[in-house]
Amino acid sequence: MALEIPEVVINRLPVYARALSELAAAGEAVVSSQALGELLDVTPAQIRKDLSYFGRFGKQGRGYNVHGLLAKLREILGIDRQWHVCLVGVGRLGQAIAEYGGFRPQGFEILAAFDADVAMVGKTVGGVTVHFIDELESFITSHNVDIGIVAVPAAHAQAVVDRLVAAGVHAILNYAPISAHVPRDVTIRHIDPVLAMQSMTFYIKKGEGGGK
Amino acid sequence: MALEIPEVVINRLPVYARALSELAAAGEAVVSSQALGELLDVTPAQIRKDLSYFGRFGKQGRGYNVHGLLAKLREILGIDRQWHVCLVGVGRLGQAIAEYGGFRPQGFEILAAFDADVAMVGKTVGGVTVHFIDELESFITSHNVDIGIVAVPAAHAQAVVDRLVAAGVHAILNYAPISAHVPRDVTIRHIDPVLAMQSMTFYIKKGEGGGK
DNA sequence: GCCTGTGAAGGATTTCACAGCC
DNA sequence: GGCTGTGAAATCCTTCACAGGC
């Protein structure tokens, strides 16, 4: 009977969880949907409805227990555990990703990196050892890698995605500027600052010269 | 009568434009909504409907002229010109952004970077000179900066956003892990790989152990 | 025969508004 | 009195399906 949960809802939960972490760090014990909504620029009704897909976590007249709700969300999202990640591509972008300190504290452990350039093989970037790309599949299998990060040039990105999928990875974070294809049982998210820029210019263009 | 165009539509246009660039580079002269849709995993009806917000660009029986449609989309999005960008924060992340070569070829020129750390001031990162943060407002005004990129620690990010907005910037690309507040006439986009990861784990968690 | 552009239908998501509980 | 949880209403977005042009 677990009715299908909209993807938009799932995408908002990590934002709620992040805000709750901050509230917890600030020593807040309880928060209302109203207060949380103001923090996040979301309507209180939206928050309550989103949470209602998963259960009844609040108390009438009071609001939500910050720690309790955070723990619930972490469980729902599956971020209450360690995930094994591998990185493909250690060019400039890949190196920046390897050196980025934001993944590990959230439970995403980059176990290894892979590259087609033999000159990179054996080096260590941000604490991650670079392997030759041909070892990708065996590493994924032997180390139970859950998530792949793609940071190769656009021309090779789909091939890398295909290899990750074939090797059994079910989630991919793609930094390459392509619309990658994946089977329906694989989840993919794209990080593309240029696309983000290009959608913003539509709105600032309007403000110039023209009407209202 | 320019009926309001949904934001989801605007967000898809850059993806269409990117695909058209590739088709153009591959020497394709014409493309149907069907073919473009297969390339992008989007339904043909969606593409046609999206484009219909802006005009009638296709020819029945043939499809769309690749160059013509691309030019139209670039004009609609405002990516047919140069934009002035400034970067705030040149820590590890900010440096990686400054060194990233993907913005300039798309018309986004990073004119300057700013940081509160005087040890960074005067240095050059990825061809961009670092200024002291207090020069932010005067630089934005004098150089007509359109877009700000925020790459400072979370604790300072909202303050930086506020300063950018006060200085007249109307679009912000935010890499800091916060839900920043901006006035309604300012457009903001968030780049947050951790949030992307955290929404994917919901789906791969389901695949494990459990049902169906 | 093929493919666009588009009203209309359908589906999804958000917001409303209020009963019920603390 | 304040705030949640939630059906119902409203809004938004996608898909259908077909008239019309090439």
Image (cartoon, coloured by chain):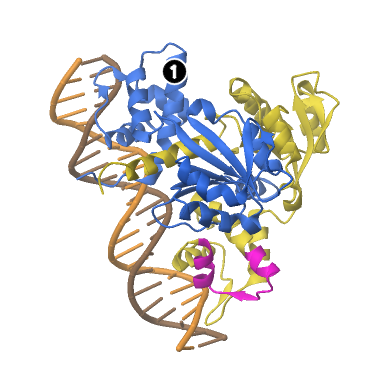
Chain colours: A yellow, B blue, C brown, D orange
- Kindly indicate the quadrant of the structure image that contains residue A146: top right
Looking at the picture, tell me which residue is in the foreground, B146 or A112. B146
The residue positioned 27% from the left and 35% from the top of the image is B54
- For label 1, the residue is B23
Q: Main secondary structure of the magenta part?
A: helix
Question: Pointer 1 indicates a residue of which chain?
Answer: B
The residue drawn where x is 64% and y is 50% is B152
Q: Find residue A148 and report its image quarter.
A: top right
Left or right: D6 in relation to B209: left
Q: Is residue A159 left or right of residue A36?
A: right
Indicate the secondary structure of the residue bearing disc 1.
helix
Toward the viewer: B201 or A141?
Answer: B201
**Bounds of the magenta segment:** A20-40
Q: Residue furthest right?
A: A122
Depth check: A18 or A79 in front?
Answer: A18
- The residue at 31%/31% (across/down) is B48
Q: Amino acid at mark 1?
A: Leu
- Asked if residue A29 is among those painted magenta in the image, a careful observer would answer yes
Position of residue A65 measured from the top left corner of the image (x, y, whole percent): 63, 74
